[in-house]
Amino acid sequence: MGIGWRLAMRAALYGDDGFFVRTGTGPADHFRTSVHASPLFAGALARLVEQVDLALGRPARFDLVDVGAGRGELLTALHVLLPGDLADRVRPVAVELAGRPDGLDPRIRWTRELPESVTGLLIATEWLDNVPLDVVERDGSGRLRKVLVDRRTGTETLGAAADPAEIFWTARWWPGAGRAEIGASRDAAWADAVERVRRGAALCVDYGHRKDERPVLGTLTGYRDGRQVPPAPDGSCDVTAHVAMDSAARATGRPYQLVRQREALRRLGVSGARPPLALAGSDPAGYLRALAGAGEAAELTAPAGLGGHWWLWHPIGVDVSLAQPGAASPS
């Protein structure tokens, strides 16, 4: 007998011995994120941390919170990259359901719960796509019904009629769909995270879509050992779905900017431009280093790949923008 996808995802990803909480493996073993692709990503975020710190007036304590921290890779890199004075004032917090990794820098606080109050920067890179959600689909008569899944086989069937809240969310954010992934749980999770930021900013980096570009068949899928696989909710693979970014943004009630990763990274100094060929003659080793960096930057900014991710930015009590000067952004 099947259950709703939200319950199935929760058990598969975060239940006993779930995909994200079991020991001996981590997300980097199964799929490639911007954090794992290149240190240039952490370098760009370090520059963003410095900008927020300056806008806050360089407070005595700067909270740096990573939600869905994986194995702490991003916070570890940021702590190395930040300048000495700021590194001394930063209080890094990893929010993650998995246990604390062995050998993690003791300065990084490891917790399962969001901090009550944040003055600084809260970051969530590819977190919301793993917040469990339900799926609905129209039957032959056009009625929205909940999609059920067998946890062992991944086989789907149609269950009871969608509830009023699901119908309302679909009508507002995924209208006319034959199949929709109900983003209300992600909206609530992100709104709760942003609410914790008293002054500073919140940043969500994820793959997603907006209302005018919702995929007809949805995006629910799985990843295992670096390959895309059917989304079997048996704990053997990651189960993920793209984020309805505009819905999550509006749920916070806060002003926001929504830009593609390639645009945000270019603003923060990451470019995929090749180094001048003349450098190869004057400094061959430097040319090779610059060429490797350009290749990594190109991967991070590729429109059809990581560069197509969305950056959802909420500045709270600070004047720090991710948009290029003169560019319009939703609010």
Image (tube, rainbow, N blue to C red):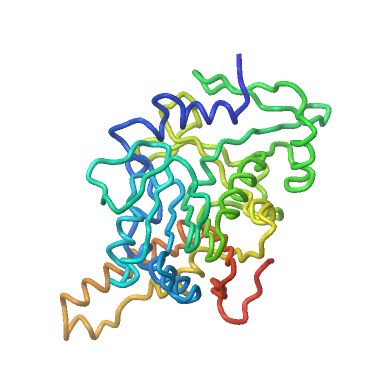
Quarter of the view holding residue 313: bottom right
Q: Residue at x 32, y 40 (%)?
A: 100
Q: What percent of the width, then of the height, locates residue 133? A: 61, 36
Where's the C terminus, which quadrant? bottom right
- Percent across and percent down for residue 184 are 67, 42
Which of the pair 171/164 is nearer the observer? 164
Compared to 157, does 259 lie above or below? below
- The x and y percentages for residue 98 are 38, 36
Please determine whether, in this image, residue 152 is positioned above or below residue 170.
above
Point 56% across, 50% down: residue: 193
Q: Is residue 54 left or right of residue 191?
A: left
Q: Is residue 313 left or right of residue 291?
A: right
Total labels: the figure holds: 0
**Quarter holding the N terminus?**
top right
In the picture as drawn, the residue positioned furthest to the front comes out as 60
Front one among 282 and 80: 80
- For the residue pair 53 and 72, the one nearer the viewer reads as 53
Q: Residue at x 71, y 32 (%)?
A: 137
Q: Name the outermost residue toward the right.
A: 141
